[in-house]
Amino acid sequence: MATLEIRDLHVTVDTGSQGEGPKEILKGVDLTIDGGQTHAIMGPNGSGKSTLAYSIAGHPKYTVTRGSVTLDGADVLAMKVDERARAGLFLAMQYPVEVPGVSVSNFLRTAKTAIDGDAPKLRTWVKDVGSAMERMKMDPAFAQRSVNEGFSGGEKKRHEILQLELLDPKVAVLDETDSGLDIDALKIVSEGVNRFREKGDRGVLLITHYTRILRYITPDFVHVFVDGRIAEEGGPELAERLEAEGYDRFLRANA
Amino acid sequence: MTVTDGPAVARALETSDKVASHLHPEGSFDVDAHPVPTGREEIWRFTPLKRLHGLHTDDATAPLGTGTTEVDVRVAPGVRVETVSADDPVRGSSGYVPTDRVSARAWAAVDKATVVTLPGDRVVDEATVLTLRGTSMDSASAGHVVVVAEPHSKGTVVLRFEGSAVLADHVEAVVGAGAQLTLVSVQDWADDAVHHTTQHAQVGRDASLRHVAVSFGGDVVRMSTSVAYDGPGGQVEMMGLYFADAGQHLEHRLFVDHNEPRTRSHVDYKGALQGQGAHAVWIGDVLIRKVAEGIETYESNRNLVLTDGCQADSVPNLEIETGEIEGAGHASTTGRFDDEQLFYLQSRGIHEDEARRLVVHGFFADIIRRIGVPVIEEHLLETLETELEKNV
Ligand SMILES: Nc1ncnc2c1ncn2[C@@H]1O[C@H](COP(=O)(O)OP(=O)(O)OP(=O)(O)O)[C@@H](O)[C@H]1O
Ligand SMILES: [Mg+2]
């Protein structure tokens, strides 16, 4: 069974040119995601949700100062970014990056080859990509376009979930995949995530600001994230409470 | 990090038809009309004169024209390639007059010229390829090639430079009315080569020229490419691609003289730099003369800086003497290698070196695709691969 285990995770961000030095964003996060489970993380803007996602993926801007992250017991923090992906982690980004001149089809094939360790059979691969794109309601013409370049917000998110389906990781971290999507796109993206879940033994960490997506993807656990740590945990009913009450209660408690 | 330079547009006050651009003084065939450069002159300020092996001086120990080079010619069916003596009137038929000392010296030093003629009213699909191979750095050579694209001809000429040499040369192109010429110059030198090349084209009425410059090798490459028109309706596309490694100086100087109405020019150069002391210089001068109404021009230079210790100088200049233009613009950017792109690709399992390769290929992709000469495209992709393996 796939298990992603996060223990007492403290993370600072390099503030760069502002010159304030490193700033602590994550202040002790504990979270265990077992295969077959979907965890939703909800929290106000700036609470550190993306920082958690990026830290798991290994973005160079973030520094882990304390704690551990393991995938099936293996030390994730000791791995390079690409090694983490090959170990079975996937991050659907809040703001997917444009890569001019690199076609989607070349990108997908290169990624698949890297993850599997050898190139996919051309015939079946072309078919797999074609049908996955069809399920995500992406025009086949996207395959020849540069990665994310000139994609609308919704198209970028669908492209992320397309990758999730094709690369088939053990644990997927989805950072606000729902934001900026109209209702049709939200359904398409949710169906993609649900297909991934149905493969069995797959873990999902679903980061979101709104409860909207939870109508289509039912989480097993909901965590409220405030000021760099988990402030409250519960089942799907917690999401409904947040829907009704908002984050005020937590923010006041925090102030 | 992206730096975009604002346009440097100078509007000349003169109203006469024949205004000499301040950037481009009248030329001369007389060597002594061009003083030995000191490095402070506008046109020389970026060039490492000390590394020119005396090409700019009159160093008696290395007179021009005695160097050894081998030329291999692959002639496409229907195309004529011949050698003529230095006093043949075909030399200079593009209207070129030397504007710097090395050019004037090279012009005076050659004893023969190679003439490539594309026959009129005929399409030649296959490229004619002239490969010049330098065999020694001990002496300097001068060279001269004239490409004559007769009226309504269509064809491709490729010049390849390889090996080790100290070379100062000229390439002239005379593009007849309605002709379509693709002229490719590939500087694929060994690490020590020094190449000063001056390429000038005259573009006839309704003719079109695609000029492609590719610079990978050499210690110093200084390439001045200029075009002028010989009638209205001419079109010019100038593309360039370069990859400067540690210690390499690659300089591309472009000048488009819009001296005829309804002419068009599009300049697009892209370069990557990596390693300590890699230096790329791009000068893009466009002059729009008073007669040149209804013209369109756009020039762009983009540099991708892969490592610390590199320098990219990029200077676009637009000089406009008429208000009646369709469009004129330019862009110049120098960007660091984008860590976010790298992170995105790596987060999909792609190894770091492979991710870098993808990003650099992506940067050059549009220009490579537009070159439209298959053998060159393949060769470019291979060379790019070798460059990337060096130290990325
Ligand atoms: N480079 C940086 N310099 C300074 N502060 C930063 C930097 N990057 C992130 N932060 C801060 O870290 C905190 C957490 O940011 P993060 O993006 O993780 O929040 P989030 O919960 O994902 O917010 P959102 O809901 O808006 O996506 C914010 O206060 C943000 O301003
Ligand atoms: Mg966020």
Image (cartoon, coloured by chain):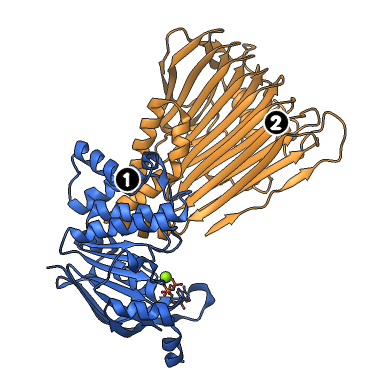
Chain colours: A blue, B orange
Q: Position of residue B324 (x, y in %)?
A: 79, 34
Mark linked to residue A133:
1
Direction right: furthest residue: B15
The residue lying toward the viewer, choosing from B387 and B331, is: B331
B239 versus A94 height, above or below: above
**Within the displayed image, which quadrant is ligand 1 positioned in?**
bottom left
- Residue B318 can be seen, yes or no: yes
From where the camera sits, is residue B337 visible?
no
Residue at 19% across, 39% down? A124
Q: Which quarter of the figure is the N terminus of chain A placed in?
A: bottom left
Q: Secondary structure at mark 2?
A: strand
Across and down, in percent, residue B149 comes to 57, 14
Mark 1 Cα within 10 Å, few/some/many (few <14, many 20+)? Answer: many
Q: Report the residue marked by disc 2.
A: B257
Image point (43%, 91%), residue name? A254
Ligand 2 lies under 8 Å from the Cβ of mark 1: no
| Subunit under mark 2 | B
| Horizontal relation, residue A54 to residue B254: left or right | left
